[in-house]
Image: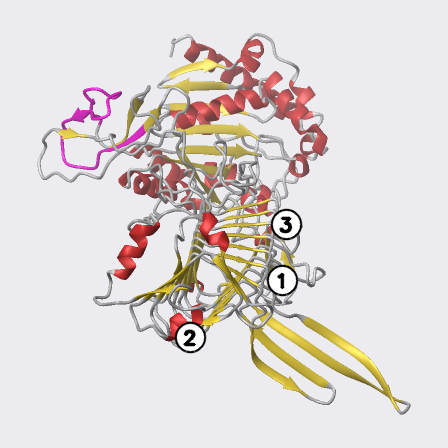
């Protein structure tokens, strides 16, 4: 592989010279000084005590084989504490290439300094590599044990009985690499470096940092990487530290300043884990999806840190979190245990096929080990691409556009199976459009003929006998209690993307999402999670429209029988006799019969549930997500402050609701109703209603006539459900 790389580089310029060190030149700098643009300097393995400067020349300086870790380890440039090991400072372009070396012993170049009577300072940049105003290619090097100075010293001096203080400061950026140009930094191993800022890398300009392993570096801020423009893609950044000022240093692994135009920096597909201090990722000003598909896990003291822009105080976790947004996860990356292959992914890693699904590798792009950058259909998170068994990945093929009804063949042959000759199965499901029949829904390439104009969308799930490809999920939340519980934008406590929407618009928003995902060929589960006010009252029109259209989504109404988010005002779901802030004497009319309103739409799946019976709830959600078309689950959710019960009574009250028949558990699949197990006995004999009412403060003082009306309504509902289950109505 190394030979082919060198051949490409050498052949790029006709008549370019190849200069060998030490056979042609005793030191590397002599070979560089003798070179012209397009030349190549090849350095034999050895220990070279020198620093080198490209001096504005667009040449290749390489070891004999940059792809052989042994050659890279034996071809050493040692600065002996005399400045930066390698310098690019005169406008070098991407055709200036440094590859295949171990760089060590650098202390950086002093760029600014001042010495006064009682005050002195210096700024040093780039211990291993200094890149200022240049855009070189830095690839397949080991950069280690380069430390730029950091000092914050105050000393009291007594001269002739007069006391005064002297101040001495040494500041520095980029222990391993400092770059303020548009360099390309790829496939390097960067470890055990130190600086004030950016222990491993300090990256400004528009630097592309990709496919690097960065570990055990230290700084005040940005122990592994300090970056404010460019891209940070597919790196493994592990165990870096802010130990130089642990009481206030941040960004143990990464310090990312996005600036007011946050689109100038992108962070994707990185493993950022096990920072020893300062948090995993410190960020400021980030927005949109500029932080996406990273695995940020196990960092001390937290994974994410940001800063309050009003007070300038650090925020640890909470509002700083990105886990669950834009594909970001937080899970043990599961590295292999071997030292020689440290920080590579093991077979059970959650990083496998978990990177940005829209990632497109550069032509010929490899991972840090020289393996294809995308092994299966989807890139892995981190510098290493796992090679071995990967769970099956479905690919339903490209969209098809036809001008007139004619046979259409779907194509799932692009799906990924680790063993294409082993067991494989395909399961196609129509998700929208006029109903059609596939000639073989279990084939890789089924066919159908559309009966009319319009959209016809299908989802594909594949399996290999061990695992089945799974759909994605997005949650739509209108104004309700959940919009508070989920956390404060831009973060969420849920492990799925969440879209907050106005009270009335949740079902309409979900309809649009469902159609959009379907049009892109993505099988993404769209879930609305709304309260009773946003469902029974304000959102009923949009919900009815979505059900009538056959929107493929799950709508969950968690019913606490009042507007709990705004102070427990009565809603259409509030039962007769219940006291709320707007019905202090008790509500005088009955609860709206939401379930029969929904049933009138004849949807594929409908159910009732309560958290008091969690297994029943789980199975119903599972069934709903597996059912094409609209599904609806109505959950009774006891609310301790609104119902005036103790928090530890929530489950008991939920069970009393079921045992007294106030809440009957059932499900209806394609029109066939069945009573759920917890409610089976209640259909014949139920507990006294007052057992349920008496434990709730909201029913204190309820009249006997109101209790009688509630009893009659319960009996009527049970009788109707029994007839429907028996098929008598």
Residue depicted at x 42% and y 41% = 385
Instruction: Residue 196 in the image: state x and y as whole percent.
Output: 62, 67
Please, what is the dominant secondary structure of the magenta stretch?
loop
Residue depicted at x 31% and y 73% = 36
Front residue of 692/442: it is 442
Front residue of 560/403: it is 403
Q: Is 723 placed left or right of 279 in the picture?
A: left
Q: Secondary structure at mark 2?
A: loop
The range drawn in magenta is 435-460
Q: Secondary structure at mark 3?
A: loop
The residue most toward the bottom is 160
237, above or below 475, in the image: below
Where residue 674 sits, quadrant-wise, is top left
Can the viewer see residue 55? yes
* Residue position for label 3: 302
- Picture colour scheme: secondary structure
* Residue position for label 2: 133
Other-residue count near label 2 (Cα within 10 Å), few / some / many at <14 / 14–19 / ≥20: some
- Residue 219: image tag: 1
């Amino acid at each position: 592989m190394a030979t082919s790389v060198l051949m490409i580089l050498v052949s790029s310029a006709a008549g370019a010279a190849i200069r060998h060190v030490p056979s042609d030149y005793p030191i590397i700098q002599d070979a560089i000084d003798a070179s012209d643009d397009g030349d190549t300097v090849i350095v034999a393995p050895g220990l070279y005590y020198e620093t080198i400067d490209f001096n504005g020349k667009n040449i290749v300086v390489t070891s004999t084989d940059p792809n052989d870790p042994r050659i890279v380890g034996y071809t050493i440039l040692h600065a002996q504490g005399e400045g930066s090991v390698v310098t690019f400072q005169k406008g070098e372009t991407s055709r200036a290439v440094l590859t295949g070396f171990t760089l060590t012993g650098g202390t950086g170049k002093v760029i600014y300094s001042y010495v006064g009577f009682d005050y002195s300072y210096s700024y040093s940049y780039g211990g291993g590599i200094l890149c200022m105003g240049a855009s070189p290619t830095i690839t397949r090097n080991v950069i280690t044990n380069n430390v730029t100075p950091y000092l914050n010293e105050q000393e009291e001096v007594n001269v002739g009985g007069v006391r005064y203080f002297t101040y001495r400061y040494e500041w520095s950026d980029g222990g391993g690499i400092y770059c303020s140009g548009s360099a390309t930094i790829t496939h390097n191993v960067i470890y055990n470096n130190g600086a004030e800022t950016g222990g491993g890398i300090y990256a400004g300009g528009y630097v592309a940092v990709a496919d690097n392993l960065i570990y055990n570096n230290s700084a005040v801020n940005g122990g592994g990487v300090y970056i404010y423009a460019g891209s940070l893609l597919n790196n493994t950044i592990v165990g870096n530290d802010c130990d130089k000022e642990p009481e206030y240093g941040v960004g143990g692994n990464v310090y990312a300043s996005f600036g007011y135009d946050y689109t100038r920096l992108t962070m994707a597909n990185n493993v950022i884990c096990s920072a020893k201090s300062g948090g995993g990722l410190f960020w400021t000003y980030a927005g949109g999806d500029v932080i996406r598909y990273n695995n940020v896990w196990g960092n001390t003291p937290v994974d994410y840190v940001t800063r309050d822009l009003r007070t300038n105080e650090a925020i640890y976790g909470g509002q700083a979190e990105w886990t669950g947004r834009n594909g970001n996860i937080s899970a043990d990356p599961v590295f292999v245990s071997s030292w020689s292959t440290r920080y590579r992914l093991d077979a059970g890693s959650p990083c496998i096929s978990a990177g940005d699904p829209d990632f497109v590798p550069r032509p010929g792009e490899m991972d840090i080990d020289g393996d294809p950058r995308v092994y299966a259909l989807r890139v892995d998170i981190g510098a290493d691409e796992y090679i071995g068994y990967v769970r099956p990945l479905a690919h339903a093929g490209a969209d098809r556009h036809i001008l007139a009804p004619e046979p259409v063949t779907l194509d799932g042959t692009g799906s990924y199976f680790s063993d294409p000759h082993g067991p494989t199965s395909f399961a196609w499901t129509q998700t929208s459009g006029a109903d059609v029949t596939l000639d073989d829904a279990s084939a890789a390439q089924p066919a159908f003929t559309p009966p009319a104009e319009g959209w016809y969308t299908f989802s594909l799930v594949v399996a290999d006998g061990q695992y089945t490809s799974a759909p994605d999920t997005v949650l739509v939340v209108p104004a309700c209690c959940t919009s508070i519980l989920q956390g404060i934008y831009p973060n969420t406590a849920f492990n799925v993307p969440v879209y907050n929407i106005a009270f009335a618009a949740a079902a309409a928003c979900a309809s649009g999402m469902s159609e959009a995902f379907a049009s892109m060929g993505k099988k993404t589960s769209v879930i609305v999670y709304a309260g009773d006010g946003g469902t029974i009252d304000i959102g009923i029109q949009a919900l009815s429209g979505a059900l009538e259209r056959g929107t493929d989504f799950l709508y969950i109404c968690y019913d606490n029988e009042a507007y709990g988010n705004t102070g427990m005002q009565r809603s259409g779901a509030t039962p007769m006799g219940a006291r709320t802030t707007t019905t202090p004497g008790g509500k005088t009319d009955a609860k709206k019969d939401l379930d029969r309103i929904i049933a009138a739409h004849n949807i594929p799946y409908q159910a009732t549930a309560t958290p008091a019976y969690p297994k029943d709830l789980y199975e119903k959600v599972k069934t709903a997500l597996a059912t094409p078309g609209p599904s609806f689950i109505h959950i009774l959710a006891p609310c301790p402050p609104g119902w005036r019960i103790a928090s530890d009574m929530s489950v008991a009250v939920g069970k009393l609701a079921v045992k007294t028949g106030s809440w009957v558990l059932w499900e209806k699949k394609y029109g066939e109703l069945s009573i759920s197990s917890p409610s089976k006995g209640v259909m014949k004999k139920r507990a006294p209603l007052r057992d349920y009412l008496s434990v709730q403060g909201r029913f204190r003082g309820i009249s006997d006539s109101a209790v009688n009306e509630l009893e009659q309504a319960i009996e009527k509902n049970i009788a109707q459900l029994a007839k429907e289950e028996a098929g008598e109505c």
